[in-house]
Image (cartoon, rainbow, N blue to C red):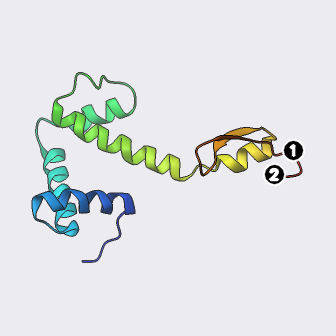
Amino acid sequence: MPTRVDGELFQSAQNAARTQSRSAAQQIDHWARIGRELEASPRVTNHVLKRVLAGQGSYDGLTEESQAVVRAIWEERIAEQLGGLDLLSELRAAGDAWTESDADGAAVVRNPRSASE
């Protein structure tokens, strides 16, 4: 069944698959099965995970399996947040200057108030 996956996830799957003699699709399937088993494990309880993800429980007190699930969820949430950011537009709208690197790695200060920006 065709399924779309994030490009970064697919690239990671390709890299991991090479060492396991799998295709990228087989690697993603493998990871999905592991995730399913982790979530179904009696050592990984959804109630505890939800408390940690809500900031009401301690990550350090989780089992290694539960920590792995929490990290995966955090990574998904971070990727979603980063995907929705448009900092350049925000800086321009606020009239704030910013610094970025050019193609050679030199720092360049950008000023949205100057005529050249």
Residue at the location (25% across, 31% down)?
A: 48
Task: Return the residue at label 2.
Answer: 117
Quadrant into which the N terminus falls: bottom left
| Residue farthest to the front, as pictured | 104
| Residue farthest to the bottom, as pictured | 1
Q: Position of residue 57 (x, y in %)?
A: 32, 24
Is the C-beta separation of discs 1 and 2 under 8 Å?
yes
Residue 7 in the image: above or below residue 68: below
Residue 87 vs residue 112, the one in the foreground: 112
Q: Residue 37 carries which label?
A: none
Q: Is residue 52 left or right of residue 92?
A: left
Mark 1: few/some/many CA within 10 Å (<14, 14-19, 20+): few
Task: Return the residue at label 1.
Answer: 113
Between the C-alphas of marks 1 and 2, the distance is 7 Å
Mark 2: few/some/many CA within 10 Å (<14, 14-19, 20+): few
Q: What residue type is labelled 2?
A: Glu
Q: In this view, does 95 lie to the left or right of 80?
A: right
Residue 57 in the image: above or below residue 110: above
Residue at the location (37% across, 25% down)?
A: 56
Q: Is mark 2 on a helix, strand or loop?
A: loop
Q: What element carries label 1?
A: loop
Q: Where is residue 32 in the image (x, y as percent from the top left)?
A: 20, 57
Residue at the location (39% across, 27% down)?
A: 55
| Residue farthest to the right, as pictured | 115
Q: Which amino acid does label 1 sit on?
A: Arg
Q: Position of residue 53 (x, y in %)?
A: 36, 34
